[in-house]
Image: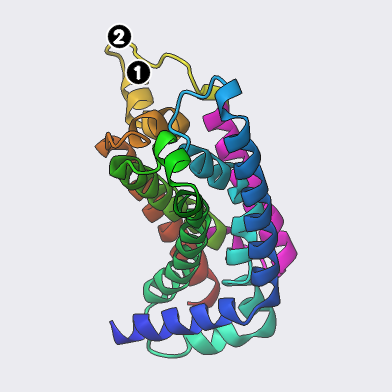
Amino acid sequence: MRQYCIILKYELFSLFISPATYVATFYFLSLLAIGFRFFIESFVYTDWILPPLSSLTVGLIFGAPALIPFITMRSFAEERRLGTLETLFSTPISNVIIVIGKWSASYLFFILISIMSFGFPLIMTILFPEQGQNLGFNQREHWIGNALFLSIFGASFTSIGVFASSLTKNQMVAGMLTFTLLTLYISFMAFSFGKNTDKSENNLGNILYHSFNSIINGLNKLEHFSVGLIDISTILHQLALTLFFLAITSIQINRIYR
């Protein structure tokens, strides 16, 4: 546990002193704030079926390919380039601890940005309490559901970014690879959004399909989470996806340095 805390503190310190993370966070939150303002102003003229608070969740999910690379790209790539990772692996610290520590720092930073973004509806509710109540910003279940949805998807997204960083010594290559993987993943979810996935045939193909249904149809599950209906299968699938990418990251690092 002590070794994990040391890695976590070091990675968080590296993130907080990196100018790239501040620049990326500033522009990302600025664009998200502008989009949120225009969404709220035009909400009555749209056919949006989710609670208004979910607009921030959608913005964070679709904006993840632009944000996550700046958080995760230096996790392993920069240390491999500088040679400091070899020194780290020469210490009696398990490579699993190192991978989990680096991922935890990236994940916590993503959670911090998500918390900051949810400050927008809070500020609106304080300044305009009547409008905030009309938009449902006082509904606790909306907050809990959206926060949980972001938490589980943020875990899998950052694990993908850490894995991409372990494949190369170049930060830019790691960032572009993370961007590509996340864009493909979110594109699959976007294309499957709104489609009927209820199939009654009990063959192997459908069993596999339903087993990974929550991974491919993540945006459909937002309809449940956004109103406080927690889908356990989605949580388990995202947890499995996170563990999978952390495991292959550990294997990749072990292949290089052990």
Q: Give the range drawn in magenta.
A: 163-190
- Apparent side of residue 20 relative to residue 129 in the rendered image (left or right): right
Query: The N terminus lies in which quarter of the figure?
Result: bottom left
Q: Name the residue under label 2.
A: 201
Give the Cα separation between the discs numbered 2 and 1: 7 Å
Could you say which quadrant of the image residue 186 lies in? top right
Q: Which residue is drawn at 30% across and 14% down?
A: 203
Front position in the image: 164 or 189: 189
Residue 220 position, x and y percent, is 43, 27
Residue 166 position, x and y percent, is 57, 65
Q: How crowded is mark 2: few (under 14 residues within 10 Å), some or many (20 or more)?
A: few
Residue 65 position, x and y percent, is 63, 49
**Which is the main secondary structure of the residues drawn in magenta?**
helix
Q: Looking at the image, what colour scheme do you see?
A: rainbow
Front position in the image: 28 or 88: 28
Q: Element at badge 1? A: helix
User: Pointers 2 and 1 in contact (CB under 8 A)?
Assistant: yes
- In the image, residue 48 sits, relative to residue 99, either above or below, namely above
The amino acid type of the residue labelled 2 equals Glu
